[in-house]
Amino acid sequence: MNTVNTTITSEVGQPEEAVVPISDEKPAETVIEEGKTVGKPFADDPKFKLRDVDVFYGDTRAIKKISLDIGRNEVIAFIGPSGCGKSTFLRCLNRMNDSIDICSVKGSLHLDDHDIYDPKRDVVELRARVGMVFQKPNPFPKSIYDNVAYGPRIHGLANRKSDLDEIVENSLRKAGLWEEVKDRLDANATGMSGGQQQRLCIARAIAVSPEVVLMDEPCSALDPIATAKVEELIAELSESYTIVIVTHSMQQAARVSHRTAYFHLGHLVEVNETNKVFTSPEHELTESYITGRFG
Amino acid sequence: MQPANLLLLTLVLAIVAYWLGYARSRSLAMPLGGIRHLKSLPFYYGARAALWSGIPALIVLGLWAAFQGKVIQLIVIGGLPDGMMPASQGEASLLLSKISNVASGALPPGFAEAPIVDAAERLKALQAQSRLLMSTLVISVAVLAGFLGWLRIRPRLNARAQVESILKWVFFACAALAILTTVGIIFSVAFETFRFFEKVPFTEFFFGSHWSPQTALRADQVASQGAFGMIPLFTGTLLISAIAMIVAVPVGLLSAIYLSEYAGKKVRGVVKPLLEMLAGIPTVVYGFFAALTVAPFISDVAASMGIEASSQSALAAGAVMGIMIIPFVSSLSDDVINAVPQAMRDGSLALGATQSETMKKVIFPAALPGIMGGILLAVSRAIGETMIVVMAAGLAANLTANPLETVTTVTVQIVTLLTGDQEFDSAKTLAAFALGAMLFLATLLLNVIALKIVRKYREQYD
Ligand SMILES: Nc1ncnc2c1ncn2[C@@H]1O[C@H](COP(=O)(O)OP(=O)(O)OP(=O)(O)O)[C@@H](O)[C@H]1O
Ligand SMILES: [Mg+2]
């Protein structure tokens, strides 16, 4: 397909219509059918089973009838233009949207067949199972040790100091940070480099042994070397965790994920195996977005 | 012309200069092909002309107004016949006030000696002359300087740079005025404190435990020797401040935590302004609330429990002062807690921490230095507070730690020392300056420490 207007990228904050490249033969406006996702959105025995999810900020509908399964030990990448609802959807998975007053979530969201939004559900337990890493590294202004030990302490995961030491060491090792910080565990975490801080946040998240790790653009504040380290880490973690990663970098999505989901204006347009999405996307919007980036 | 009218006239002249300068720069620019051939916009040429006209005129006006009185006085006194020449400063000022009374008609001429009446006439004539001279001088300076400024407008003249540098000096002068005033106050307090220590030994003031600032009014009067030990006053101040902080810190802090972390938008919108309204109540209102409501209540309760309590007590004053300081503590803490980035809260919540765990383990520790700074500022506010203590704590300088007794504070004693008729250079009056200096040093120290802490904390997140 011949595309024009490929230089407009999503970060500029243009109105969404402007982001959609206009093809030669088709009209400018591509109609998205609500609730319809091409590709393979569903899986057998999924970790997350999400059906007809709607998210509202006040009266604004930010997520429009999205259905998706996320498999066990799967790495799934969310891509799409800025403001299309990736973060919003991600934050539904561990109910981080709860702290936004005007945000309301509709639809059915299940984690291992338990309703995430059940009013009786213990959010604390949910978040212990579904950890999260944020776009900007946000270590607490405490020592490196205390940062990692924070979660285990809250959840009473260690009975003795030696247990806690072990958890801290293991988490830091998994995050590939142990060798760099083992001699200064008492140093303040805010004194570390950005890449180290982000890996510390990952260590902090896995210290409570979650089953799922949500990552919202975890590398956007990092340089290429730190990014490579984090990506390596994701590949290792995928052996034992389910990982959902939001990213603006197609290359990153291609490198780390098994499946890729393309969001557009609150719709989930296409979900497929990552190499399929990047080599032969089924939906024209997906193709426009990808080619817009690459070509 | 009166100085005030003259001031208005100068301003009018400056405005005229502005328009003339503006017009001239435009007319100079037109033949060249428009105002873009000027070095600055016409506005700046106008402003430059206005400043040229206004500033010298204002300086002349200011100097004249400041010194004319003194000069006229000297001339009038100098013109008196030899027999009436005043021998001392005091006599001279008496004489002068008599002369000006006659001149203004407050004292009929029949009641004054002939030379005085003459002098009054001379005074009136001199004043009229001076005013005339001043008016001419100021107006001519304004016109002349404005004309010069107007004349020197050239398209290549960088009026903007000139105007901005003049304005920079004007701003600097204003800042300097504030600083000079502060320095002046410090010096005068320091000077009087020094004089106090010439009369009362250093050791007595700092280490004496007895305060009763009585001094003999006349040399032959039999009076008790005054005692100037400041320790009871400082302990009184500390006691009351401590009580105030015991009330204000927990209440202020907890309400700040409630407001910033738990309260919904609506509650916050109502409670926060209400709380801050506490800060707007005049201290004198708090004072009589303390004296007429709280103090009797405390002494009644104490009496019913069989404890003796005086009708004025440190507890009453301290408790009410604490209430007054609550908004201070709460709004400062609220600011600091809100300054802790949302990312910290998210990070903690995402790990499965509850809201109160997040508050206790992440936000509060992160905000603590800032909160400490806020509390120290509140303490210095408590130490300097006067009205409530005057009304509710009493005047007796007791050296006690019992909050049910009456105590007095440094500020209260300064007030009592300086109210009423006082001989200006007695040890009693000077003691007020010494106390003031101590108070100033104490609060200054607290403020410096507090600001340091607060600033250090800010750097952590910026
Ligand atoms: N707290 C909020 N209040 C109101 N509207 C919000 C809020 N957060 C997000 N939105 C809106 O919801 C929509 C989706 O936002 P979201 O942050 O999920 O986008 P995103 O895909 O993560 O974008 P980006 O790639 O820029 O991070 C946007 O239109 C945004 O304006
Ligand atoms: Mg986002």
Image (spheres, coloured by chain):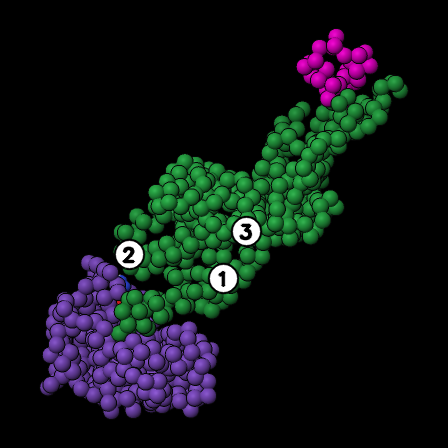
Chain colours: A purple, B green
Both labels 1 and 3 in a single chain: yes
Dot 3: element = helix
Labelled disc at residue B229: none
**Relative image position of residue B133 (x, y in whole percent):** 75, 26
Label 2 lies in what chain?
A: B
Read off the residue under disc 1: B454
- Which amino acid, by three-letter code, is at mark 1? Val
For the residues labelled 2 and 3, the Cα–Cα distance comes to 39 Å
**Is residue A114 among what the camera can see?**
yes
Looking at the rendering, the stretch of residues picked out in magenta corresponds to: B96-125
Q: Is residue B318 left or right of residue A70?
A: right
Rendered residue at 18%/74% (across/down): A268
For the residues labelled 2 and 1, the Cα–Cα distance comes to 25 Å
Mark closer to the chain start, 1 or 3: 3
Read off the residue under disc 3: B235
Specify the quarter for ligand 1: bottom left
> Does B41 appear above or below A192?
above
